[in-house]
Amino acid sequence: MESLGMSETEQTLAAGATIGNKPVNQDAIAVARNEGAGLVAILVADGVGSHFGAEVASAMVVAKFREALERAVSPCEIDIPSLFFDARTHLERHVKEHAGDLPTDLDWRNAFGTTLLCGVETDDHIILGYVGNGGIFHLRGNFNCFPPSQLLPWTAVNYLNPHSLSQDGKNILYDVLSVDPEHRMTPTVLSLRKSRDRFGDIVMICSDGLYSYDQVPIGKDDQDHIWISGEESVAVFFQHLSRFFSGEEYTDQALQAALEEYLAAIKARGLVADDCTLGVMVTGAALRFQRSLGGMPSGEGYR
């Protein structure tokens, strides 16, 4: 078994970044590596803004999830739904231990709620799990090999179907990770078999401040044709990721710097209305393909 999800010549890259747009950033991000078990993971949580202690919830569940992954002896131990429930149990214990510090009239239906998204790479698969909303983008390693006329790559798709519903003109999350004793959390889990022999795989997970399908504008033109808005922030992400690959340094630190530059760029362009957090994982096969391009993607659409 290859350790760290590595290919024959390249180690998987993983990094994350966050930028706040509130007095307190309620998002949390973590990267987990477990060489012994051959695991790499990216984790993102977005504390529910209307909830008391939302930033505490997001930070604690991400930390617990990361700890469990780094402690695992084998990938066979990894059961994604169980990790979600263990993170919730950890949060519940913390809240009970500090119950004396909490408001006596606290509405538990609106306390310590958070989304939680993960991408976990094993030797053969990338396992995706989530509760809540946000985005989970799967890109083939050739996403930047398109002509300028192709505005967005068809080799990128969002797999996250939000746990939300429409209520009084707003999108309301019906499933989050919280301490509400009456709430039954049901995480969604998907498994992707990795592409080893061609372009490889890139996974980006993000909070809804960056993208969530339940917040994409949909309307009609004057001929009654339905249109769906392309999200400018995602298009800019493709540009910055392509720019990263056109550089010479392929390291976790360089990838993190590229993600931080990306978040600063969309904030400068007025595209940040909420806390924004994202994690990116680039498999060894994708790195191998990008190196074969010699830093010069065949298409210029995302430079």
Image (cartoon, helix red, strand yellow):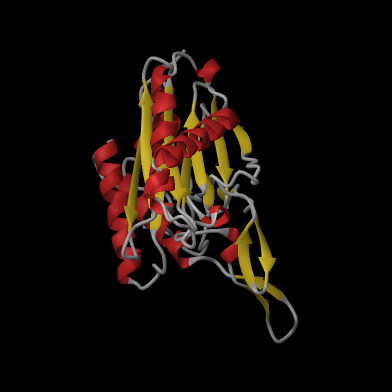
Seen from this angle, which residue lies furthest bottom?
Answer: 222
From the viewer's perspective, is 81 left or right of 220? left
Seen from this angle, which residue lies furthest right?
Answer: 224
Seen at 48% across and 29% down, the residue is 121
x and y, in percent, of residue 119 in the image:
49, 37
Seen at 43% across and 46% down, the residue is 57
The correct choice, above or below, for 70 with respect to 258 in the image is: above
Residue 112 visible in this rendered orientation of the protein: yes
The correct choice, above or below, for 211 with respect to 294 in the image is: below
The correct choice, above or below, for 285 with respect to 301 in the image is: above
From the viewer's perspective, is 200 left or right of 255? right
x and y, in percent, of residue 138 in the image:
53, 44
Residue 193 visible in this rendered orientation of the protein: no
The image quadrant where one finds the C terminus is bottom left
Number of numbered discs: 0
x and y, in percent, of residue 268 in the image:
30, 70
From the viewer's perspective, is 185 left or right of 62? right
The image quarter in which residue 223 lies: bottom right
Q: Nearer the viewer, residue 207 or 303?
A: 207
x and y, in percent, of residue 62 in the image:
42, 39
Q: Nearer the viewer, residue 104 or 43?
A: 104
